[in-house]
Image (cartoon, rainbow, N blue to C red):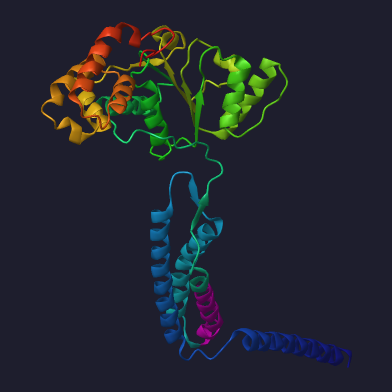
Amino acid sequence: MGSAIKHFVELVEQAGTVFEVANTIRGLVENHWEFPKGIDQNVNNLKRKRDELNGQKEDVESRIKSELRPRKKVKKEVDLWIENVKRINGEIPNLESKVRGSSFFPRGFLVKNVRKKEEEVEELLEKGRFSDDLVVNDLSWIGQVLPTPSLVVETIKCKKNEIMQHLRNDEVQKIGVYGMPGVGKTSVVTLVNNELLKGEIEFKIIVWVTVARNCSVIELQNKIAKAMNVSISEDEDETLRAGMLSEILSEKGRFVLILDDVWERFCFEKVGIPESSKGKLVLTSRSLDVCRRMDCQVVKMEPLSNEDAWTLFSDKVGQNLMSSIDLQPIAKSIVERCAGLPLVIVIVASSMRSEDSFPIWRNALAELNRNISSIIEIKDKVYQQL
């Protein structure tokens, strides 16, 4: 009798277990299974919408290319949208493969997955209709485009290219551009500054500082900090300030520091300019000795060639005026007396612009001949007589 009762209890327990399993299966079917009729068409609709999404993605990427400039970056929401499109492009083939490889009953569990994926694609299509710009200012960039002459002659272009070549060379850290006053040192490094801001070489920080004569260490530190829109301690302790400046420059990443018109050698460590592979220094100086003592790769600025000098003079004085047969010989003599110095050429040409009187041109040449010895004083004052 006891064994019969025990057997009955076991049957009841088994029946309960079967009942629970049946309920579980029924719940799964009710919640996750649908009649899979038409699922192949759903997959095709999903693929069609995916293709539409990829077309939208190509349009967005084309817009990014047209809008992206140096010192700009793609908006975060746009980056995330593109990443989501890439993700869903990887998920759809896997889902399609599961549907194609499943029999009738397993397919019923995939119907909702296909619909859900279709809803995701539709949502991305809606979000991808960006009406505003796709890029924003990249605040990690530092630098300022500087005004440059409308005409850049070949001599200056060649020197700019030489400096850019040194900047591409990992073995060169410091570049010293030297030459007499008015020969075009500032003009050429201005071109370099603007070229760097185009992003051809990956420097995110381009700092321009005009040093000038008798500039103290603290003054130079302040100028560099101001150019970078950062503040350093107002304490007069040069060492403390140097440490702060060096830390800021090091944390900013790859940088180019352009120091225009350096008169004397200075210690990088005292100023706070880190000498590392991340940073490059470009300086201009009238002194070859300064460039050498600061361990620079030297670039010598040469006077303009006769052809470049005449091109620059004609451009500034006016091409129509230079078509005069009577004025050309005097004008060429004046250009010759300017000794290939761009600054002198520009000043003289500008003063004679639109002047078509032959006697005035003749007097200008005579005046220039009388005062040529005092026009250029290399050490201190430049073009005083001009």
Residue 67: x, y in percent?
42, 54
Residue 200: x, y in percent?
38, 38
Question: Does the image show residue 87?
Answer: yes
Q: Is residue 271 left or right of residue 126?
A: right
| Relative to 43, residue 136 above or below | above
Residue 112, quarter of picture? bottom right
Residue 167, quarter of picture? top left
Quadrant position of the N terminus in the picture: bottom right
Query: In terms of depth relative to the viewer, which is nearer, 346 or 7?
Result: 346
Residue 215 falls within the magenta-colored stretch: no
What's the magenta region? 105-123
Quadrant position of the C terminus in the picture: top left
- Of all residues shown, which one is farthest toward the right? 2
Query: In terms of depth relative to the viewer, which is nearer, 25 or 54?
Result: 54
Residue 358: x, y in percent?
18, 24
Residue at the image point whose x is 46% and y is 18% from the top? 261
Residue at the image point whose x is 10% and y is 28% from the top? 325
| Relative to 22, residue 162 above or below | above
| Relative to 29, residue 223 above or below | above
| Relative to 344, residue 76 above or below | below
Question: Does the image show residue 169?
Answer: no
Residue at the image point whose x is 42% and y is 65% from the top? 57
Residue 381: x, y in percent?
43, 11
Query: In terms of depth relative to the viewer, which is nearer, 151 or 96?
Result: 151
Tag count in the figure? 0
Q: Main secondary structure of the magenta part?
A: helix
Query: In terms of depth relative to the viewer, which is nearer, 326 or 219?
Result: 326
Residue 246, quarter of picture? top right
Residue at the image point whose x is 34% and y is 7% from the top? 374
